Image (cartoon, rainbow, N blue to C red):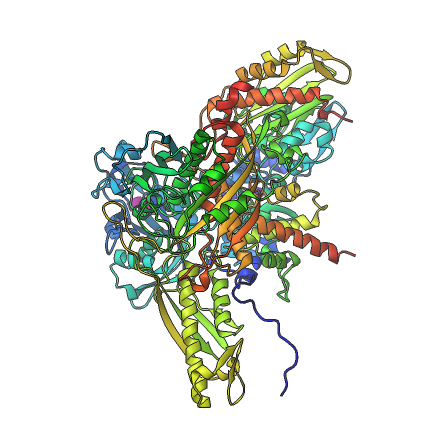
Amino acid sequence: MIDDEEVSYRLRVNGADHDVPGAWLGESLLYVLRERLGMPGSKNACEQGECGSCSVLVDGRLVCACLVLGAAAVDRSIVTVEGLTDESDALSLVQRAFVDAGAVQCGFCTPGLVMTVHDLLERPKAASEFELREAISGNLCRCTGYGRIMDAIERAFAEADGQRP
Amino acid sequence: MTVVGTRRRAPRVGESAPRPDGVPKVQGRFAFGSDLWAEGMLWGKTLRSPHASARIVRLDVAPALLIPGVRCVLTHEDVTGSPYYGLEHRDQPVFASDVVRYHGEPVAAVAADHPETARRALEAIIVEYEPLTPLVDAEQALDADPIHPDGNLVRHLRIRHGAVDAPLPPDAVSVEGIYEIGMQDQAFMGPECGLAIPSDDGGVELYVSTQWLHVDRDQVAACLGLPNEKVRLTLAGVGGAFGGREDVSLHVHVCLLALRTGRPIKMVYSREESFFGHVHRHPARMWYRHSSAPDGTILRVDARLMFDGGAYASSSSAVIANASCFAAGPYRVPIAAIDGFAMRTNNPPCGAMRGFGAVQTCFAHEAQMDKLAAALAIDPVALRLHNALAPGDVLITGQTITGTAPVAELLRSLAGAPLPSDRSADDMLARPGGAGRTADDAHVRRGVAIAISFKNLLFSEGFDDYSTARCRLENGLVTVHSACAEVGQGFVTLAQQIARETLGIDEVVLAAADTTIGSAGSTSASRQTWMSGGAVWRACLAVRAQVLAAVAADHGCPVDSLEWVDDQITVPDGPPVAVRTFSEGRVFEEVVEYHHEPTSTLDENGQGNAHVSFAFAAHRAVVDVDVQLGLTRVVEIATTQDVGRIINPLQALGQIEGGIAQGVGLAVMEEIVFDNGRLRNPSFTDYLIPTALDMPSVTVVELIEQPEPGAPFGAKGIGEPPTISSTAAIAAAIRNATGLALTRVPIRPDDIALAVGGEQ
Amino acid sequence: MSVTVARSLDEALETLARVPQSMVLAGGTDAMVEINFGHRRPQHVVAVDRIPELNEWRSDGSTLRIGAGVTYAALEAAPFERLVTALAHAARTVGSPQIRNAGTLGGNVAMASPAGDTLPVLAALDASIELHRVGEVRVVPWHEFFVGPKKTTRRDDELVVAILVPVRRGPQAFLKVGTRNAMVIAVASVCLVIDLDERTVRCGLGAVGPVPLRAPAAEAWVADQLVWTDDHVRPRDPALSREFGRRVGEAARPIDDHRGTAAFRRHAISVCAARALGRAFDGGLQGGKP
C-alpha cells in the first residue's frame, strides 16, 4: 500500500452504508465506487469533470463523481446508476426511453446521461430544446450525435407526464 | 393441442430491433474493459517519453522497485519476443530502447498494488534523455535524414490515369488550391483498457477493448515469444473505437507484466494517456488542380497529397492508398495524376479513423468543386450533377463501377430538401457563442452548402478479407459465435436479426467474441455488416440446410418438397414441423468462413481493381457564423446516403447522426495542437468535441436503397460515409457565409475573425 | 495525507492554522483534477463544503455579501440574476451543469485562473475578497488579491469566506468567447458594468492577462462620451461603441496559447466590449434591481 496514512470511512450509497477500509485518501468517489465498492456503473472517461460519464447524485445534486473526494463524501447520500434499478430489476422510465429510442451505442456515456436525465425530470420542466440540450451539455457522447438521446429525453418527459396525476 | 393467438415476433432484417446490450448498458451493468476485476489484481502503468525525439542516455528503474507495493518494472530489455509490433509493418518498439521518436512513446511499464503507487513508481524511474531536433514536417521528411531504420517514406502511391501527357484544350478552365487538415482524435469515451491473466500453461488470457482480436493476438504472441494458441483474447466491452483501437496499445505491456508477476494485471489509460496511446487521423496538406471544359465537364485532376503518418507506420500505407484512390471524389475524371505520400515524422503515429483517408481528400476535392463552379459561374450542385459518377463509369484507378452508385440521386434529393427557417431560435443563447452571450444579429450570417463523397467498403488492394462465424441450433435456441468486435456500431443487433430472418427463431444469443473461433476481421472499413453479417448469414443458411435435410430424412421426402415458413417447416405428408421442437435434443452446427470477392493490387500507375464496393453520401450544412468573432453554430445537417439496403432503420439513423457529429467536430473545433512535436492539448478540457449544444439536429432527407450486388441482403456499410463529406459541407457553408477561402480545417475563430475583422 | 471535513468555520480555520499547507477543497472542480492527475499530493485536505456560513448570502442594499461556497448553479438564479446580472450570466458559462452544481464562487476566486469566468465580473464590479484566519478578518480589493496566474495574496492559513460585491444600478453585460458552444474555457471575456448612480463605466477583461484586468483609460474616456440620465445612458456619437471596443482592446495583455492567439484575443475583447456597450444603450440588462 502507499506509504501514506491510510483511512477508513463509511459512505452511504444507494441507501446502504458501505465501509471503505484502508483507503488512500486521494481516491475520488469515482475510484471508490468502481474499485472498492464494486459499483463500476459510473464511468471513467476523463477524470476531470469534462465528460459527465461519472455523473452521480450527491445529496440530490448532480455532480461528477471524479471531482468528489471519497473521504469527504461521508454522511452524504450518494445515488449512482446502480441505485436506479430496484429489486424487481425493472428499468426506470428514463432507462426504458434510452433503450427504445436507440440512444445507446457503445454505451460508455449512457449511465452518466441516464443520471442526468433522471435529475432533469425532477426539475421544473425545461422549456426549450436549447435548455434540454444545455442540461445534457456536460455529458459528452461520441457515438450518437445526441439525436436519439434527445428523442429519449422527449420520450421520458412524455412518459413522466403521463404518469403524473 | 391447438395454439391460439399470436406471439409478438422479435424483429427481423429491415426492422428496428433493439440492441441486446441496451438494457445492461442503461443499468450500468455492461462490463467495459475498465470495469473488469480479478482476485489479486495489480495495476499497470506506462512511462512515456516527454520528448518528440531524443536519445535515451540512461535508464534506471531501481528507485521505482524500492517503493513498497511496486511489484515489477519492465523496459525494452524485458520483452520476451519480438521487440516490435505494428498493424501493417512491425516497426514500432514495445518499449523504446536507444531512441524515442514521438512525444508519448512508451519507455517502461510498472505493476503495483494501487494506481497511485504505480504513478509514483513511474516518477521514480530515472530516464536521462539527450533531446534531438524533432522532424515535425512531412514535406521536409522527404529529404531529411531518416528517423527510423525503415526510412521516412512509408508509401508513395502514384496514380496516372488517362492521357496524362496530353495538353489540355486551350479553353480549359483550371482552379488550384492548397488544403490542410489538422490532426483529429477518435476521442472514444471509454479509454484503452485491458486485463491480462496468466494461465497455467504459461500463456495468457487477455480481456481487451479492441477492434480486431486476431490481429492483436498475432502481434501480442509474437512480442511475448509465445505461440498463438497460448495467447487467448476475449473482447472486453468497448467504449467506442472509430479506428483508434485497430492498433495495439497496452496489449503487450499488460501481458508482459502479467507473465512476469504471475498476477492478473489491469491497465486503464487516463484520458491524457489515451491521447498518447492510440493513433490519430493523419494531418494532411494537399495541393489540387482541377481542369474542366467551359461547360463544366471535368477534364483532369492533379493532386499531391502529403500525409503525416507520425513516427510509426500503423496503417499509413492503406490510408494514403484510400486518400489517393478517392482523391477526385465521386466524379467522372478521364485524366488524373495523383501523388500520395505517407511520411514518417516525430509526430505521434497516425492510422485509422472513420473515413480513413477519404475525409482529408473529400475536404479538398469538394472545396475545389466549389471553386471550379465559381470560376465557371455554374451552380455547385449542377456542376456536381454534370460530372456525377454512375454505374459503369471508370474510376481514376481504372476500375469500372459494377455495383450501385446513386450519386446523381443523392444530389438531387438533397438539393430538393427544404431549408430550415432562417431563425432557428430568437434566443441569443441558441446563436453562435451560446451562453457566452456574444451573438449580435447584425454580424451573424447564414451559410448553406453541400458536399458529396465516396469511399470503399471492405479491405482493398488484394487483402484476403474474410470473417468466420458459427451458428448452432439446439433446443430451439440459436447461438451465434463471431470474433467481430462490437464497438457500439450494433453488429450484435444485426447478427440476431440475420439469424432470426434465416432460421425463423426468435431466441438468438451471441457467444462472447474471442479468439477460440477464427478471425472476423476488423471492425473498420464499414465492413462488418457485409463481412461478419455475411458470415453469420451463411452459417445460418448452412444450419438451415442441415435442418431441412434432417426433416426430409425423417419424413422420407425430398428436401425441395419442404418449405421453411417463419419458424415452421411445411412437409407434404403431415402437419408442419416446428423448428423449435424439431431441434430438441439435436444439434445443428456449422462454421463458415466468408471471403469477399478478391481484389487486385494497384500497379505502378495506381491502376487496378483494388476495391470491392463503394458507398456514397451527400451532406448539406446550414451554419450561422458570427463573422466578427468567428464563432459558428451548425444549424442543421441534411443528408442523403447510399445504403444498399437498411438492416435496422434505428441503428442506421444512429450511425448517420453519430458519424456526422465527428464531421462537425473536425470542421469547427477538433484538433490536436503541437508545439514542435509536443502535444499541447491532450485532455477533454482542451481537445474539444461537440456537446449537445454544438451538434445540430440531422435531417435524413433520403436513404437510397439500391441493393448492392454481391452484398449480403444488398446492404452497404453505413458507418463511415456520414463523417466524410459532413466536414466538407460545413467548411463550404462557412465559406458561403463569410466569403473567405478557408482552406484549412478545423476552422478556428481566428481564421474567420482576423480575416473579416477589418469590417468591425 | 489526511482530510478534515470541517463542520464550522472555526474548525476550518483552526485546521488551517495547525496545517497551513492544507489544500482547501470546496466544490472540488479544480482541486480534484490536480489530485487525480497526481499534480498535487497535499498532505492535508480541508473540505469546506459543509460550513453553513460559506453557503449563505445577504445584501444590505448597497453590498452583496456572497458566501464563498455559493455554487455557480445558485448564482445563475434569483436573486443574483436581478442584483448582479453579469455575475449570473458568467456563472451560466462555467463548465457543465455538473460543474456548476459543485463549483463555487470562492473556489473560482481562490484558484485565480486567468480564465476564471467570474473574475472579470468581480473586477468590473470592484468586488472585494473577505479572508479569515484564526483571530483575523481582512477584506482585500480584487486588484490586490489577484497577483498572477493562479497566484493570490491569500496566506496559507487564510480561507476565502465571502465575496463582497457592490450592488450597482444600471446596465450590465458579460460576454465570453470560446471555441465551443458549451463547456469551454474562455479565450476572452468582457464584463461591462455601468453605474447610473456614480455615472461610471467599468469594464473587466478575462483570459487576456495574468490576472483579471480593467480598462481604466477606456472607461474614463467613454464615461465622458455618454449622455447620462437617471435611468439610462446613451451615446453622443453612434460610432461610440466601436471606438470604445478599440480602446478596451488596448488594455488587454493577451498571450498565444493552444486555445487562441494573442491577436484574436485582443480582437475578441474589442468586439465584445463594443457589443456590451451597444446593449447598454438598447436598455439591455439591468443590474442592481431591488
Residue B728 rendering spot, x and y as whole percentages: 46, 39
Check the picture and name the quadrant holding the C terminus of chain A: bottom right
In front of the other: B640 or B499: B640
Q: Note whether A62 is above or below B497 in the view shown.
A: above
Q: Note whether C22 is above or below B582 in the view shown.
A: above
Q: Note whether A36 is above or below B624 in the view shown.
A: below
User: Quick check: is B65 in the magenta stretch?
Assistant: yes
Name the residue: 57% across, 51% down: A112
> Is the magenta region chiefly helix, strand or loop?
helix
In front of the other: B117 or B442: B442
In front of the other: B243 or B239: B243
In front of the other: B161 or C214: B161
The answer, for residue B394, to whether it is visible in the render is yes
Which region is colored magenta? B62-66
Residue B416 rendering spot, x and y as whole percentages: 57, 44
**Quadrant in which residue C180 is drawn:** top right
Name the residue: 54% across, 45% down: B414
Residue C155 rendering spot, x and y as whole percentages: 55, 27
Residue B55 rendering spot, x and y as whole percentages: 24, 37
Name the residue: 71% across, 26% down: C285
The answer, for residue A143, to whether it is visible in the render is no
Q: Note whether B282 is above or below B497 in the view shown.
A: above
> Left of C281 or right of it: where is B633?
left
User: Quick check: is B673 in the magenta stretch?
Assistant: no
Q: How many marks?
A: 0
**Quadrant in which residue A41 is drawn:** bottom right
